[in-house]
Image (spheres, rainbow, N blue to C red):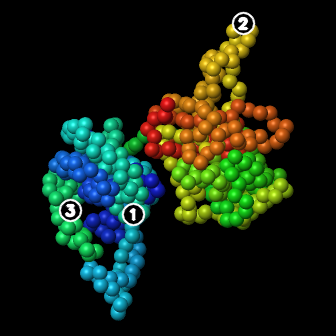
Amino acid sequence: MFALEVEFLSGRVYATDFGERDVPEWPPHPSRLFSALVAAFYESGLDTDLRTALVWLEKQKSPDIWAGSFVARLESAAGSRFSRPKTPGSFVPINDDYSGKFQNSARRRKERWFPSATLEDERVHFIWGDAVPDTATVDALRRIAAQVSYLGHSSSLVRVAVIESPQDAVLKPSDSGDTLLRVPSKGRLEYLDREFARSKGTRQFRPGAGAVERYARLRKNKVSTPTPASSFGEMIVFQRLNGSPERIESLLTVTSVLRDAIMARSPQQPAPGCISGHGDTPHIACAALPFVNHRFADGSLKGVAIILPKGLTETDQLVIFGALNGLEELKSKQGMHWQIRRCLDNAETTTLSEYTWARKARVWASVSPMLLDRFPKLINQNGKELTANAPEYKPGDSPEEIVADSCERIGLPRPKAVRLHKNSLVLGVAPSTRFHIRRRKDEAPRPASHVILEFSESVQGPVLLGAGRYFGLGLFLPLHALETIPL
């Protein structure tokens, strides 16, 4: 068996259906994936001997497909044709013809469509169940897949990887199927080479659709297993427009000011429990969003987020949104003064995108240290606590078990593995020892550490853990590039 996973990193697909220009293509056709692999191979300047792997792939039978969101949409359509949103047309000027000659006179306009759709599950699996590739072929395709950055339109940013355990297929090739998908076939690579060479020097590189195969939907896979998710829900993000660029180490200053501002603006005074956190009512968390996980990341705060808990009543929601309405600045007596603006649509940076912090992943790493909910307890020997480099903890009271308990406390399963360290796995994050972890001077200190979590299955964020989670400590980032925790 051989399988490829495509993950749409923005949670949206931008691609035009082959048959209907005003609806998005979903799931991606196997031929589209093959073309993306070919393009990545040539554009990346990989070794020419890897071309043999693409030839091997085009000779295989058409792959089975698993696409989670496709199944969910089928259910909502009550068995009818896949219900996809239609896109209104845009009339775009034609600037040049295919010879490259600029049309200076009559600026004709032609109707075009740019369809896209939000996905319920960002992953797609292409499964060649009968394929038996050798090690060299798998390694070659893995190298090529790693170079694919988009699928369809350049806005459809993706990660493509070889996987060993794909999901069960929901679409299979079948002569009686009612779904037509374009698929690669023997000679497709040679055809693409020939068409590109023929059109080189012009803008007219439009290869034909190629072979088409009928696919049948499998009823048994219509219901997918819900993804485990934390008790934290929607993130309301505000961008810092100006003001001192605080660093992540001082996040408690920012989140405390944010909470005080929301408390003061609450339509109900004193502020109810859904804002203040007093009582048993689910309440908001305040987080600071740093520029991290990039080679130029410096840990500066680009904005803040109010994270709503799940289970809020309609009354509590109205109170919270009433407090946030018109919030345009954060100001403290100590001199902090930010002008902020709510990010209503697409965020200008990935730091301010809810998807960056809430997407599904198996491996998560802290960007702010986690305060353990309780102190670990060592085993006493001869009345003395062990202080060696490898201390022995009482059952259930090791730091790793305390972190696992914290995961369960916010509705997540117990992680398969936990690592604690003073340094974070995320680029741009300072060691835990540099963070201010007490909001008040009289506050009792707690053990603090950066943490890496690995779950047995993907979990949905946002993930905030530990005693300081409602003030942005213990904020985690999903890491899709890692399949297991590094040693």
Q: Are marks 1 and 3 in contact (CB under 8 Å)?
A: no
Depicted 347 relative to depicted 408: above or below: below
What residue do we see at 35% from left, 45% from top? 161
Name which of mark 2 and mark 1 comes first in the sequence: 1
Q: Residue furthest top?
A: 382
The amino acid type, in three-letter code, at marker 2 is Asn
> Is label 2 in a helix, a strand or a loop?
loop
Report the residue marked by disc 2. Answer: 382
Residue 373 pos. (x, y %): 69, 32
CA gap between label 2 and label 1 equals 66 Å
CA gap between label 3 and label 2 equals 77 Å
Residue 419 pos. (x, y %): 56, 31
Residue 154's tag is 1
Name which of mark 1 and mark 3 comes first in the sequence: 1
Report the residue marked by disc 3. Answer: 192
Residue 292 pos. (x, y %): 58, 50
> Is label 1 in a helix, a strand or a loop?
loop
